[in-house]
Image (cartoon, helix red, strand yellow):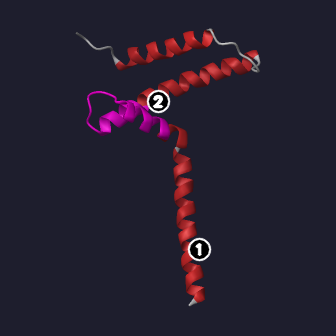
Amino acid sequence: MNEPEPLENLQSIIKAAEVELADTSPNGFSPEGFERLKQRISEFISQLTIESMRVAKRHQSDSISPAYVDRASEYLISGKSNRWQKLVEGLGSISWELGWRRRGQ
């Protein structure tokens, strides 16, 4: 049996999300705001699918496990810039602590 191509699979996931959102009332959203929400959800689904595939590939796996999806989601939510910011803040606090200790000696 042939498995669906990743692009076909992605399109079916996005379509299912669109169908689900079509039945949702846009409480509190303007029509334009609700359309933007639907666009962002579709974008996130695409990014999450692609990143999940990347995680599975890094682990040399033939399938995408729930753990890989979770890892991909955490990566997308945290963002690259946020990771760099945390690294720089961490290095800055270490430098400050070392400087403080030198002054005390």
Residue at 59 percent across and 88 percent down: it is 104
Where residue 51 sits in the image (x, y, percent)?
42, 33
Q: Which residue is the site of mark 1?
A: 96
Q: Quadrant of the C terminus?
A: bottom right
Q: Please, which residue is most extreme toward the bottom here?
A: 105
Taking 2 as reference, is 10 left or right? right
Residue at 77 percent across and 18 percent down: it is 30
- Seen from the viewer's position, the closer of residues 97 and 39 is 97
Q: Three-letter amino acid code at disc 2? A: Leu
Assign a secondary structure to mark 1: helix
Q: Quadrant of the N terminus?
A: top left
The number of discs equals: 2
For residue 57: magenta? yes
- Seen from the viewer's position, the closer of residues 67 and 103 is 67
Mark 2 Cα shell of 10 Å, populated few (<14), some (14-19), many (≥20): many
Assign a secondary structure to mark 2: helix
Task: Tell me the distance, in whole angstroms, between the alpha carbons under discs 2 and 1.
Answer: 38 Å
Q: Which mark is residue 48?
A: 2
Compare marks 2 and 1 and give the one earlier in the sequence.
2
Q: Which mark is residue 6?
A: none
Taking 58 as reference, is 99 left or right? right
Where residue 44 sits in the image (x, y, percent)?
53, 28
Mark 1 Cα shell of 10 Å, populated few (<14), some (14-19), many (≥20): few
Which portion, as a residue range, is magenta? 51-74
Magenta span: helix, strand or loop, mainly?
A: helix
Residue at 56 percent across and 9 percent down: it is 19
